[in-house]
Amino acid sequence: MANTESDLAGVSIVIPAYNEEGGISSSIRDVKKSMDDSGIEYELLIVNDGSKDKTAEIAAQEGATVIDLPENQGYGAALKAGIRKSKYEIIVITDADGTYPAERIPGLIGELGDYDMVVGARTGANVAAPLIRKPAKWFLRKLASYLAGRTIPDLNSGLRVMRKDLIRRFVHLLPQGFSFTTTITLASLCSGCFVKYISIDYHARIGRSKIKASHAFDFLLLIIRNIVYFNPLKVFLPLGGLFFLGGFTKFIYDLYIGNFSETALLGFISAALLWAVGLISDQISKVALRSDGL
């Protein structure tokens, strides 16, 4: 069921910005035009995350409400600062670099309905993404989809509409850095929340990217950590299965050549330990989730 304008008291649009003087003006204008044309009540919050350039001054000149952080805290920290200051119960986040299509924001808001979160998935006809990042992003997305038990078209899109209650529910898990969006995606899906994906285009950014190639490994660890928190058996059972298969294969080989070694036994023991850790972690996870109200 789509939202109608009468369903909404208003939305808070939160945009974190760090040294984005090149793109902040056009980003604000695009968002304001899109929202003004839609007739939806809104506030526009720019979180200046310790920028060293004129990001804050330009944002203020464009009529946005500027929240200044004295030092650079990170993408997630900036989002949380903006959300804390927001006055509406529906939160929209997007970026300050012109990559996400602002004209799609009202449509995403309209799709919220009974969902907890609507994500603009960067799967449209025009997606400007560096080729060098695509293999890593594909692998991480497939891994996250398997572990979460649901197809995830876009793991860390920065354009999404969320209920503030959803953010409050997982705020203790949400990190300070770029992994904010990845974490809330996995936490929502693993907890049975309703998440809807809408295909959008993705433009070339204005200015330099803040994401480094080394962040791919951090995202991998983040995915595994989140799944271990919500569903540890998804991690430990397959790992134990691999060790068991290795041990069994070595056992058959040793049986064939008539020379038994400790390697097969080590594989079986490792499998048993991993399965035991998985079962114990699963019980701990259930207790932790109950205590967190999840």
Image: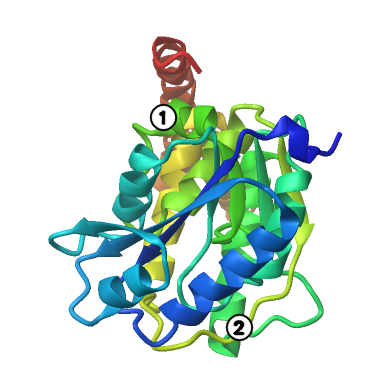
For label 2, the crowd category at 10 Å Cα-Cα, with few meaning under 14, some 14 to 19 and many 20 or more, is: some
Where is residue 66? Give x, y as percent: 31, 59
Please state which amino acid type lies under the numbered disc 1. Leu
Name the mark nearer the viewer: 2 or 1. 2
Direction left: furthest residue: 70
Q: Residue at x 62, y 60 (%)?
A: 141
* Camera sees residue 15: yes
Nearer-the-camera pick, 90 or 240: 90
223 or 7, nearer to the observer: 7
Measure how far apart labels 2 and 1 are at the Cα level: 42 Å
Colour scheme shown: rainbow
Identify the amino acid type marked 2.
Ala
In the rendered view, would you say 215 is above or below 74? below
Residue at the far right in the pictured view:
1
The residue that disc 1 covers is: 273
Crowdedness near tag 1: few (<14), some (14–19) or many (≥20) residues, C-alpha within 10 Å: some
> Which residue is drawn at the image coordinates 58% and 87% (left, top)?
204
Is residue 42 or residue 292 the one in the foreground?
A: 42
Q: Which of the image's four quarters has the N terminus?
A: top right
Relative image position of residue 127 (x, y in whole percent): 70, 81
The quarter holding residue 214 reads: bottom left
Report the residue at 53% width, 32% height from top.
89
Residue 42 percent across, percent down from the top left: 56, 48
121 relative to 271 in the view: left or right:
right
Please name whichever residue, 43 or 272, is drawn nearer the observer in this view of the structure: 43
Question: In this image, 250 relative to 284: left or right?
Answer: right
Examine the rendering and report whether any part of residue 214 can be seen.
Answer: no
* Residue 90 on image: x %, y %: 57, 38
Residue under numbered circle 2: 129
